[in-house]
Image (cartoon, helix red, strand yellow):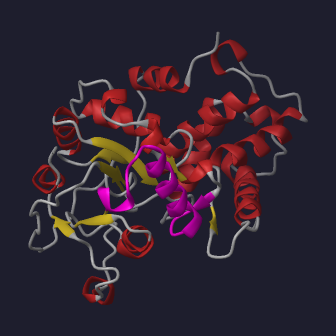
Amino acid sequence: MSLTLSEYADTLAERDLIWPQVLPPRPVKAKPSIALLKGIRVVMWDVYGTLLRTTDGGFTLFPNPEVRLQVALEKTILEFNMWNSMYRKPGPPWQSMMPQYRDYVERVAMVPTKLKGDFTDVDLVSVWKAILDRLFDKDYKYDQGVYGNEEQLSEKIAYFFHCNLQATEARAGAARAMTDLAEVGVTQGLLADGQSFTFVQLVHALKKQGLVKPIHEIIRTDATLLSHQMAIRKPSQSLFQRAVEQLEVMGVAPEQALHVSCRLPTDLAPAKAVGMKTALLVSEKTGLEAPADLIKDPQSRPDRLLTDITQITSVVQSD
């Protein structure tokens, strides 16, 4: 039987590999607003930029500077022995792969959404599956006992590639904050732009920070919605409406849910528009998106402001 994505991630962690590192946070001057919000039953976390710090402040497929993309492609080609099955041109391997990668990402991004007001999400796994299809045309071989079928292989490649493309680490205090909420009986989920590997990436980062409690006792799948599941990304109206529908199945009204993110325009403003309570995380400059006009507008202004993620336990407490 092939490795699960989580098991594969474990094997990578055991190897002496060099991964990119997130730069130290640049502090922001802000005054917290952490009074208790009564009636909150569910906390829905954003992931990239909020629970996970990234070099770019959020999830990206085209980092700046571009050399990071070159390095990630080069490492991926080497890791999965792709070079002999590639349509090669003179120069380093990444130069042959780069146009394919850009082309497939752009093709997916151009697929129209079903509803007006939604934004297409790019599934990185489908991008690598398309690249693999070209490799198979030139008799590409891999270890199915380790990587599984083509879909499972594509997911593992996407995970490895993204770990080299974007440095990620759990935000300071994230494991503690989530554990403390779980211990007082507060339901937690995710509402975020994310890939099929995002959950595994998050769990591994939290474990590095000392998370001991089993993740299924902290994050509920029925309170979680990632963009790849609907092929649309924030601030798509349908994404937030689906989140509300999931809450209703749980018997939770929108105003009983708190969405936590460092981005006001794409995350918290649309969450508030569907009736959720919101908390803006202002703990560093990278990734923070909080325009003054949205802060002042009662229709979009966050209900609470956190300068440290552990302050969530002051805002949300069990009944």
Q: Is residue 274 visible?
A: yes
Chain part drawn in magenta = 232-260
The residue located at (74%, 23%) in the rendering is 149
How many marks overall?
A: 0
The residue located at (55%, 46%) in the rendering is 195
Q: Could you say where residue 79 lies in the image, as x and y percent from the top left?
A: 60, 30
Q: Is residue 258 visible?
A: no
Residue 185 image-quadrant placement? top left
The residue located at (91%, 36%) in the rendering is 137
Q: In the image, 165: left or right of 202?
A: right
Q: Could you say where residue 183 lies in the image, as x and y percent from the top left?
A: 17, 32
Q: Is residue 246 magenta?
A: yes
Q: Which residue lies most toward the front here?
A: 251
Residue 114 image-quadrant placement? bottom right
Q: Quadrant of the N terminus?
A: top right
Residue 106 image-quadrant placement? bottom right
In the depicted structure, whether residue 242 falls above or below residue 288: above
Front one among 193 and 53: 193
Q: In the image, 105: left or right of 195?
A: right
Q: Could you say where residue 152 lies in the image, as x and y percent from the top left?
A: 67, 28
Front one among 64 and 175: 175
Q: Quadrant of the C terminus?
A: top left
Front one among 195 and 64: 195
The residue located at (62%, 60%) in the rendering is 232
Q: In the image, 202: left or right of 140?
A: left
Q: In the image, 305: left or right of 137?
A: left
Front one among 235 and 81: 235
Q: Could you say where residue 281 lies in the image, as x and y percent from the top left?
A: 24, 63
